[in-house]
Image (cartoon, rainbow, N blue to C red):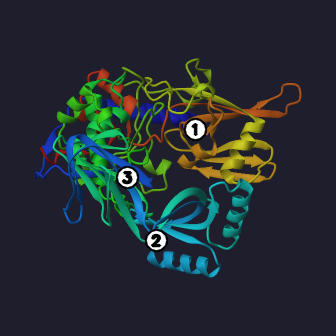
Amino acid sequence: MREVFRYFLIAAIVSALVLQGIGEVNVSAQEQEPTIRIGVVPTAENLVIGAEGKFNVIDKETGDVLFENLQGTVEVELGGTAIVKTNYRLQAASTTSESFKEDWLQRAEAAGYATYVEEFGEFDRLLIGEFPADAGWSERAAFKEEIIAAGLGGNDAYWRVVTVGEGQKALNVTAEGRTVTVTNAVQVVAASELVSINGKPYRGLAEAGFNNSGTIAGINELKMEEYLYGVVPHELPPNPYGELEAQKSQAIAARTYAMSNMGKRSADGYDLLPTTSDQVYGGYAAEHPISIQAINGTKGIVATYDGELITAVYHSTSGGATANNEDVWNSSATDYLRGTHVAQKGNSLKYVPALDVYKNSDEGESLRKVKKGDFEADWSRYYRWNFEWTAEEMSEVLSLYYNTEVGEVYEINVLERSSSGRVAEIEFVTENGTFYEYKDRIRWALQYINANGDPAVLLSTLFIIEPVTDESTGKVTGFKTNGGGWGHGVGMSQVGAVGMAEAGYTYDVILKHFYKGIELETRYQ
């Protein structure tokens, strides 16, 4: 624990020196403001699209006007000879190697397995098997073991519910009692530039097109700054996080993330998803005046390192210190994603106590009370938290994660910690074997039971875990943990940014505190 404490103290001293000066924003060669495409409805068999005021529906490829001067909405259904199938498929691997993919497909198909390749950016996801959506756990578990034994997947293979459209695809577009069938994507174009997809309002254009799975994708295409209007209020809610400099920091981080990930999901016809898989985007209804002020006040500004856009990852609450990226993910060390101290609210130079202080704090929030999603708007509520599993709950959680009955859990041992104090390797000693997990995946292995009675991903890997024993028998009756923070811990701490803003620091200083050695550039105005 002394090493963890020492790390925080050194980081505090170094960062105190960094925070003495105010940075500058460089003006780079001007580009045009980009447009971005968001898959607000990633997959569907039908959509309802429309606009505020009068609008036209056009064939995206030919430009032909299919409907003119409409008001209200238009229904779009999957047509042609397309058949939509929803099945459990086992994701066995993800690869960028064409030779690996071809070899895997040849072996899998020669063995008689149904296969499916899903494009995901630069990667191909390799899926195997085709089970109905109501297939039982034991049936799927046996199939997974069969695939592992055949050398077509590993223990990290996992099940996904995948919807696929097969056959000749078309769109049936219906308005005012008339149906037009087209084989291209269709767009709603409105003078008001306020459109809707499944009843939800968005700026820009609304589009119904085909995704990589052959079903319909509802896509919102709009200008980058307008996209950010719907992102920043979700990623850093102005109530209660209304500090303008923190909002500006979030705007620049979100803009940088979006611009560096353009085309990430091009195989599905759009750039990004509107979820935590990319950035949460709520469209027009999510907009807030404070966030808009922050976005407009930093228009076109992005974070760069050696002239390249950075990977501007961020998280809710660090718990006291952010982490080096390679300590959390299986990636090479990134110069600007170095761990640093993060103070509690309003005191940006205060380093946190050593990890063993967690269990002596009365301020920790019990995760037993948490319902999924209800704590996002609270101010650093999960700076400290705790949870206690019964023996039965721990067995259930680990059995679900490792896809096998682990039986009684005898010990849980932290084998390694990173410099920020986060758990880097953990060992689960059980009745039916010893299991291991590493880095951020530990949060998925060691899930807690929320107020709905459902397993939920542990908030962070910054924790201590200990057995709970019966005083009379010495038997392990469960496990308890005390921890801090919420999220992966890499890059900018959003609550930390709010605390620094409250203490008087500007967005450039905040960003350069969390992303080491970066420059801020204006790419467009």
Q: Is residue 111 above or below residue 69?
A: below
Query: Looking at the image, which is closer to me, 67 or 58?
Result: 67
Above or below, 167 against 31 in this view is: below
Which tag, 2 or 1, sits closer to the chain's start?
2
Identify the mark at residue 334; answer none if there is no mark. 3
Count residues near mark 2 (Cα–Cα under 10 Å), then give few for <14, some for 14-19, many for 20+.
Answer: few
| Residue at image coords 41%, 63% | 79
In the shown orientation, is residue 86 left or right of residue 299? right
Q: Quadrant of residue 237?
A: top left
Element under disc 3: loop
Q: Secondary structure at mark 2?
A: loop
Instruction: Measure the alpha-carbon separation of dots 2 and 3.
Output: 45 Å
Disc sitting over residue 236 in the figure: none
Q: Mark 2 and mark 1 in contact? Answer it, CB < 8 Å.
A: no
**Quick one: label 3, few (<14), some, or many (20+) residues within 10 Å?**
few
Q: Amino acid at mark 2?
A: Gly
- Residue at image x 62%, y 40%? 447
What is the C-alpha distance between the residues marked 1 and 3?
25 Å
Dot 2 or dot 3: first in sequence order is 2
Residue 449: x and y, percent? 65, 34
Labels 2 & 3 near each other (Cβ < 8 A): no
Relative to 282, say whether 378 is above or below: above
Residue to which mark 1 is pinned = 458
- Horizontal side, residue 476 vs residue 29: left or right: right
Q: Earlier in the sequence, mark 1 or mark 3?
A: 3
Provide the secondary structure element on which disc 1 rests: loop
Looking at the image, which residue sits at the far front? 177
Residue occupying image coordinates x 75% and y 43%: 395
